[in-house]
């Protein structure tokens, strides 16, 4: 691809500016904050719990609906947690910053303290499926087993851009350089809430806690004998 990477702090954006601009309105958080107002258009939630694994929802709120609540349920009160939440009355997709260019400073400060990172994303298909990606194959193997044992379908995504395998993907920027990306289909997310499209707020179904506990169990098994929180 032609073009040079856009600077992301001290780290170049993994996508050429032309590609990032074509996919997203803003190629970086630095660009986004010049036009959007924190507290009105978006909010940022951070919980630092000094855990080995940090849970992120970089496209939370109304950007990829349900991902903030899902990430918070996984983190519970034991894992470090971050969410970038879209709050706009419409066009929240404008706040989407691709994962290889996600340069929000509070997020990077959090993941710098974590051995591995797990990101929660929303995928558009109607199937009820978890698309598992990222470079942390050990953690991924544990998650595939624990989620599968609870009845969740787990498979890789057919689109390489949704597989989380780029070294600059935010899920791979923890201390180990390897993380996990969960792309959760619209069909799956709809099953975790009573009204997935409600503007009044999401009400969780019991299946959300089953999902969250399965993810935490996979993390705990992967890090058995080490401190996870």
Image (cartoon, grey):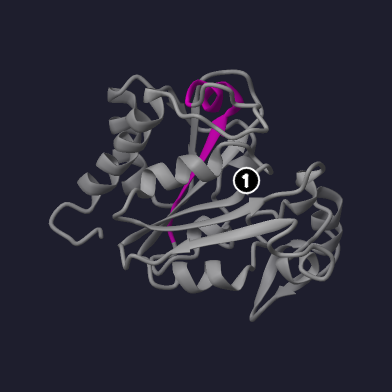
In the rendered image of this protein, does residue 113 appear above or below residue 150? below
Indicate whether residue 58 is drawn in magenta. no
Residue assigned mark 1: 61
Q: Compared with residue 214, is residue 101 higher up or lower down, i.e. above or below?
A: below
Position of residue 218 measured from the top left corner of the image (x, y, whole percent): 28, 41
* Residue 57, image x, y percentages: 54, 50
**Residue at the location (50% across, 29% down)?**
203
Q: Report which quarter residue 97 is drawn in.
A: bottom right
For the point 64% across and 35% down, the residue is 159
Who is closer to the viewer here, 218 or 186?
186
Q: Residue at the location (30% across, 23% down)?
A: 150
Magenta stretch contains residue 185: yes
Q: Please indicate whether residue 213 sits to the left or right of residue 197 in the image.
A: left
Q: Quadrant of the C terminus?
A: bottom left
**Residue 60 spot, x, y in % from top left:** 60, 47
140 on left or right of 142:
right
Magenta span covers which residues?
Answer: 178-192
Query: Which of the 4 image quarters holds residue 26?
Result: bottom right
Query: From this viewpoint, which residue is outermost toward the front?
Result: 200
Q: Is residue 125 above or below residue 53?
A: above
User: SS for tag 1?
Assistant: strand
């Amino acid at each position: 691809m032609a073009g040079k990477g856009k600077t992301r702090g001290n780290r170049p954006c993994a996508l050429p500016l032309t590609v990032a601009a074509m996919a997203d309105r803003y190629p970086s958080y630095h660009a986004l904050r010049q036009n959007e107002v924190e507290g009105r258009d978006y909010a940022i939630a951070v919980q630092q719990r000094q855990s080995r694994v940090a849970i992120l929802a970089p496209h939370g709120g109304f950007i990829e609906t349900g991902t903030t609540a899902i990430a918070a349920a996984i983190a519970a009160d034991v894992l470090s947690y971050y969410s970038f939440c879209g709050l706009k009355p419409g066009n929240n997709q404008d706040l989407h910053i691709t994962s290889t260019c996600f340069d929000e400073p509070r997020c990077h400060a959090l993941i710098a303290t974590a051995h591995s990172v797990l990101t929660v994303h929303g995928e558009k298909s109607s199937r009820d499926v978890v698309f598992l990606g990222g470079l942390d194959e050990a953690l991924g193997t544990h998650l595939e087993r624990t989620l599968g044992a609870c009845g969740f379908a787990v498979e890789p995504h057919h689109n390489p851009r949704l597989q989380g395998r780029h070294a600059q993907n935010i899920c791979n920027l923890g201390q180990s350089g390897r993380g996990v990306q969960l792309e959760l289909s619209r069909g799956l997310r709809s099953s975790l809430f009573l009204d997935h499209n409600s503007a009044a707020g999401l009400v969780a179904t019991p299946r959300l806690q089953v999902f969250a506990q399965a993810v935490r169990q996979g993390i705990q098994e992967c890090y058995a004998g080490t401190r996870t929180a």
